[in-house]
Image (tube, rainbow, N blue to C red):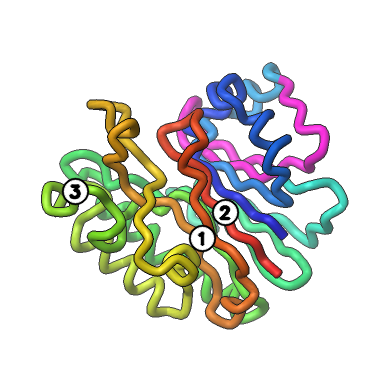
Amino acid sequence: MKIISWNVNGIRAVMKKGLPAFLKKERPDVLGLQEIKINDAARAREQFDFKDYAEYWNPAQRPGYSGTAILVKNGIKVISMKNGLGDEKFDREGRVQTLEFEKFYLINAYYPNANHELSRLGYKLEFNKEILKYCKKLEAKKPVIIGGDFNVAHEEIDLARPKDNVGNPGFTDEERRAMTKFLKAGFIDTYRYLNGQKVQYTWWSYRFGARARNVGWRIDYFCVSKKIKQQIKNAYILDKIMGSDHCPVGIEVK
């Protein structure tokens, strides 16, 4: 099974910048999208046509903000679907979706950004705590695969200029410790597991030609329960795909 995650920074924008062609070329079995920035009313007006896929949407209450969606190739059985963590302060921003498949749960997650001046750092850390608790609860039933924009560069290798960014949103000690705690709780960063110390990034600022110069951050991940790490046959970053300030990341599950 080929699973891809992509923070599209606006579904309407990325539809005009190559998402249909990307789907046709890559043909993922599952595509998790973050930061869709569209509510149900606006989506109805747009009339997106993902004819080969079943669609699961989780928009934020605030128009043009946040939100997630999952596309599942027709014919793949989804046992159940759930939006949210069960906590309104996170769920109103459309940050988490869970699909249950026969052998695992798949979580599509858009972690909060700590924001400039770290105004949402507390909110972000609380989200980290709650989603870890949620993942462990699901894991008691069957293995978990979680993919999405985690909004943190875990180690210095995960961003181009670590010394310049110490204490900045996405590279605070607190956020990095929360990621370490998540991994120590039994989850595997699939990219690092299969690619070692390879340097690739998944997000670049729109400013100063950062993407052209590859001054980026790796903040988009797929993490899996330790018990299924041997079933992850590939983990990769599609950093040549344009259309957003993020690029897609993917895994192949046996």
Is residue 24 on the magenta stretch?
Answer: no
Can you identify the residue that label 2 sits on? Answer: 250
Can you identify the residue that label 1 sits on? Answer: 222
**Considering the image in quadrants, where does the N terminus appear?**
bottom right
Which numbered circle lies on residue 37?
Answer: none
Taking the image as shown, residue 165 lies to the left or right of residue 32, namely left
Locate residue 80, reporting x and y percent.
75, 59
Residue contact at pointers 1 and 3, CB within 8 angstroms: no
Badge 2: residue crowd in 10 Å (few <14, some 14–19, many ≥20)? many
Tell me which secondary structure the magenta stretch mostly adopts.
Answer: loop
Question: Relative to residue 103, is residue 146 depicted above or below?
Answer: above
Helix, strand or loop at label 1? It is: strand
Locate residue 53, reporting x and y percent.
78, 41
Locate residue 124, reporting x and y percent.
33, 53
**Residue at the (60%, 78%) spot, across then down:** 230
Locate residue 29, reporting x and y percent.
73, 51
